[in-house]
Image (cartoon, helix red, strand yellow):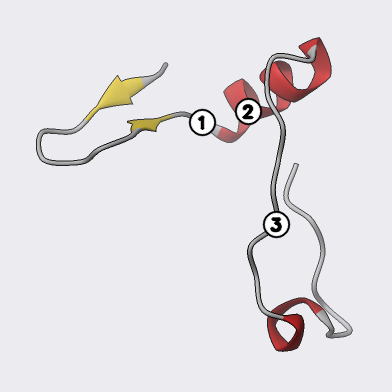
């Protein structure tokens, strides 16, 4: 369930909620990792 935490400028959502939003076309995922953070044998995109 989406929730706001006092002092945070964003809404927290679960992985399941993110997955549903992406599948419905209601959201876009932007990967902001640096190249060294995603160029590894064990790295993968979440969801």
Q: Is residue 37 above or below residue 43?
A: below
Q: Are marks 2 and 1 in contact (CB under 8 Å)?
A: yes
Question: What secondary structure is marked by label 1?
Answer: loop
Q: Residue at x 69, y 81 (%)?
A: 37
> Quarter of the image holding residue 44?
bottom right
Of the numbered discs 2 and 3, the one sitting upstream in the chain is 2
Q: Nearer the viewer, residue 7 or 20?
A: 7
Check disc 3 and report the residue beneath it.
31
Depth check, mark 2 against mark 3: the one in front is 3
Depth check, mark 1 against mark 3: the one in front is 3
Q: Is residue 24 left or right of residue 37?
A: right
Q: CA distance from mark 1 to mark 3?
A: 17 Å
Q: Residue at x 33, y 34 (%)?
A: 10
Q: Residue at x 76, y 82 (%)?
A: 35
Q: Nearer the viewer, residue 34 or 44?
A: 34
Depth check, mark 2 against mark 1: the one in front is 2
Q: Residue at x 46, y 29 (%)?
A: 13
Q: Is residue 40 left or right of residue 1?
A: right
Q: Is residue 20 left or right of residue 14?
A: right
Check disc 2 and report the residue beneath it.
18
Q: Is residue 32 above or below residue 47?
A: below
Question: What secondary structure is marked by label 3?
Answer: loop
Q: CA distance from mark 2 to mark 3?
A: 14 Å
Question: What secondary structure is marked by label 2?
Answer: helix
Check disc 1 and report the residue beneath it.
14
């Amino acid at each position: 369930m989406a929730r706001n935490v006092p002092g945070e400028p964003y809404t927290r959502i679960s992985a399941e909620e993110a997955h549903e939003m992406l599948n419905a076309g209601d959201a876009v995922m932007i990967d902001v990792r640096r190249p060294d953070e995603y160029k590894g044998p064990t790295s993968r995109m979440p969801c």
